[in-house]
Image: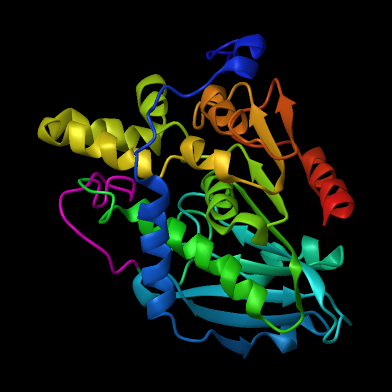
Amino acid sequence: MPWFDLSEQELAQYRTSTAEPDNLDMWWKSRLEEAHAAALPPVLTPYGTDAYGPLSVWDVEFSGYGGDRVRGWYIRPAGSGVESLPTVVCYIGYGGGRGFPSEHALLPAAGYAVFVMDTRGQGGRWAVGATPDSGHTGPEYPGVMTRGIATPETYYVTRLMVDAARAVEVAASLDGVDETRIAVSGGSQGGGLALAAAALNGEAVKVCHSDVPFLCDFQRAVTITGSDPYAEISAFLSQHVDLIPAALDTLRYVDGALLAKRITATSLLSVGLMDEVCPPSTVYAAYNEITAPKEIAVYPFSGHAVPRAHDERRLRHLREHL
C-alpha cells in the first residue's frame, strides 16, 4: 500500500476536527463510579504449573463494566516471590481474546509482572477469548463496532473502555504489584484501550505504550479507509441513515483523540505510514493531543503492524521510565 494519508509535515500539525462533548469528564466519571460500585473482589486461580513451571500464572476474573465478570491473566517472572514489581496491563487487538499465557511471556522474562485483560465478546479470530458481552443488543453490522451505537451509554466500546480502566485499578490492588509503577500497553484496538485507560486513570498510570492505535478520530477514520473495523461503521450507516447523527455523537464519547489530552503518563506511540486499518492521521490525532512527555516511532514502510525491532524500543522505554 503506498502512502495515502497526509504528509509527515502535515501529520505533525494535524488536529482532529471533532468537537468534544461538553460533559465528557462527568459522563466518564459516572460510568467508572457505576462500575466501581458494582464490583466484586477479583478471583485468582493458579494456572498451568505443569506447563509453566517456575513462571507464576493465575487465571483472573474481575469486575468490569456494570459488574460484568471479565477474564484475564496475571503473570509474574520466575523466582520473583512476593516482591512488588513494576506491572504492565496489556490489552488485545480487534478480534482476539486473552489467548494463552505463553503469548504474554516476553515481559515476565524481562522482569515485569503482567496483567492481561480479555476482550469481552471477542476472541476467536486469531486468539481465544473467555468473556461474554452482556450489554445492549439491536441491529448491528457483523463485528462489534456498531453494537449499541445509537447512544454512548449502550455502545459496546463504552463497556470495553470501562473494562480497560477497571483492569488498571484491579491490577494495582494485587499482591506483588507496585502500584506506583504501572504501565498500559497494546496494539491496534489494544493501543486504543491503552490510551483510554491512561486517560481515565490519570496519575495511576506512569507509562503508556500504544502501537498503531485504533479507536481514534473516528469521524475522519470512517471516511478515509475502507478497511475493517472502521468500515463496519460506515457500512452500517450506509443503511441505517436515520442513525447517522446519533452514531457520530456516540463516537465522540469514546474517541481516543479526545480522551488523549487527559493522559499524564509518559507515552510511546507508533504509526505505520502505510496503515490502511488505522490511518496515520488518526494516530497523530491522538498523539498531538497528549501534553505529557511523549514520543512516536514512525515506520514509513509499515502497514498495520510494527516491525519486530519495536519490541526492543518498548523494552528500553519501560526500563527508562518504569
Q: Position of residue 312 (x, y in %)?
A: 85, 45
Check residue 29 for magenta coloring: no
At 45% from the left and 56% from the top, the residue drawn is: 161
The quadrant in which residue 50 appears is bottom right
**Start-end of magenta stretch:** 133-149
Query: Image check: 23 left or right of 62?
Result: left
At 61% from the left and 46% from the top, the residue drawn is: 263
Whether 39 is drawn above or below 188: the answer is below
Whether 77 is drawn above or below 146: the answer is below
Q: Position of residue 210 (x, y in %)?
A: 64, 44
Q: Position of residue 31 (x, y in %)?
A: 37, 62
For the view shown, which residue lies furthest in the left direction? 242
Query: Image check: 287 left or right of 53?
Result: left
At 50% from the left and 42% from the top, the residue drawn is: 259
Numbered circles on residues, count = 0
* Residue 122 in sight in this render: no
The quadrant in which residue 170 appears is bottom right
Q: Position of residue 255 (x, y in %)?
A: 43, 40
Whether 299 is drawn above or below 176: the answer is above
**Image quarter (top left, top right, bottom left or bottom right) of the C terminus:** bottom right
Query: Image check: 161 left or right of 247?
Result: right
Along the line of sight, which residue is nearer the eye, 177 or 226?
177
Q: How is the image coloured?
A: rainbow
Check residue 146 for magenta coloring: yes
* Residue 162 in sight in this render: yes
Main SS, magenta region, reads loop
**Image quarter (top left, top right, bottom left or bottom right) of the N terminus:** top right
The quadrant in which residue 229 appears is top left
Whether 193 is drawn above or below 72: the answer is above
Along the line of sight, which residue is nearer the eye, 9 or 237?
9
